[in-house]
Image (cartoon, rainbow, N blue to C red):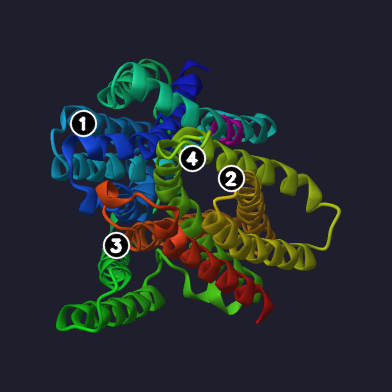
Amino acid sequence: MITFVGIILGMFAISVMQLVLAIALPHIVSEIGGGNLYSLVFSSYMISSIVMIPIFSKLADIYGKKRFYLIGIGIFATGTLYGALASNMPALIAARIIQGLGAGILTPVSLALVSDMFTAEKRGRMIAIFGVVQLVANLISPLLGKSITELLGWHWLFYLTLIAVVISAALVAIRGKELINSNKAKLSEIDFLGGLLFGALCVLMVGFSNLISKGGGPSIISTLFFLGIVIAALLLTLNERKHKMPVIKIEFFKTKIIRRSILSSVAAGAIMYGLIAILPLCGAMLGSQGFKINESQILLYFMFGTTTGMVASSFLLKRLNSTIFIKTIWIVMSISSISILYFISLRHLIVFNLLNTIIGLCLGTIMSTFMINSQNAVKSEDRTVLSGLIQLGRYMGASVGVTIFAGVLPEVGMINSVSQFAGAFGVLVVLSVLGLLNEVL
């Protein structure tokens, strides 16, 4: 049980780190500069995690999950310490890359480690605690980030996280035996090339998205990025078709409900992390203009909606037609996105906060629904692979979404008007409509 507590503490610290940093980032930029690199603080973390997840989930099965949990948390702790000491934006981004590498190991290994620790009767209850931890992190992080930043300074977001992950590592290290799967895969069967190609594809997509979001027309650089995306996608497809244990199982895309779920995970990831990146900026700007709201409150409305949607949908799906239900949610999402774009231009704060909460509610429902629907559509032996693929899709959407949402904004120091957020909320409308079309067509 001590090991389990250590794992929970580690995952809680990592989850909280993501959101408290989103709250603090406007303050960090005002102190160390680098507003033009704002989106890279988020996307660099996602991309480095993407590369690690498919590879190290298999390596942990071969060489031991506990060993790789400690390696992952050690890497994450190193990045966290470097982040606390960062004095400029490139150093902070480097710290986030290191954190992402560690988190990419921890994310799949933690859940698998818990599954190994408990019998089938207790496993479901213990895994459910993971969900509760994530929900609690979603709700307390906005206020926690604001309080720590104002009282202690933003560096302490990293120092406190470092303390938590060091304690987590100690609890996991001192108790529990290493369990290695006797039916483990061979090292030669791991899809290293597929993981690297998928990471390269995401890097190229982020670079291309950054160029497009800045409003520049076609150029030699953007054309080269586009060609790179096409070539990486083709190489990835060829590699995955041939590989025995691919990162992306191409056969999944032949099933409509799985295909829709994967594409929805990309859209949902883009929307969720894109809004997490820009909502604190919007709240800080509104607060500076005399409105009774700040960066933590505006993100709290969104995260409250997301958390509520995740919980409520898990119960509603048992009683409703899931196909009609998810289409209805996407319709509500699209209408709310169009409405929030209109009401932000009118500076109508009450309606904006209500729509912000509704969008979070829809997004939480969508994320829970596509995971449940896809899991029900495959056999037991394919569920772990599919879960990993959906997670990779969400991370890919997140890395691109953050880049586009932040890219259509002026540099952080130049944001002084509500109208400057019209482009970002316009992106929200486009992504919501695309999500709806994915379900309808």
The secondary element bearing badge 2 is classed as helix
Q: Which tag, 4 or 1, sits closer to the chain's start?
A: 1
Q: How far apart are marks 3 and 4 (CA)?
A: 23 Å
Q: How far apart are marks 1 and 3 (CA)?
A: 22 Å
Q: Name the residue tied to disc 4.
A: 112
Q: Is residue 259 above or below residue 308?
A: below
Q: Name the residue tied to disc 3.
A: 199
Along the line of sight, which residue is nearer the eye, 112 or 76? 76
Q: Which tag, 3 or 4, sits closer to the chain's start?
A: 4
Q: Name the residue tied to disc 1.
A: 78
Q: Which tag, 3 or 2, sits closer to the chain's start?
A: 3
**Callout 4 environment at 10 Å: few (<14), some (14 to 19), or many (20+)?**
some
Mark 3 or mark 4, whichever is nearer to me: 3
Residue 391 location in percent, x, y? Answer: 48, 55
Does the image show residue 157? yes
Label of residue 349 in the image: 2
Residue kind at label 4, given as amino acid type = Ala
Mark 1 or mark 2, whichever is nearer to me: 2
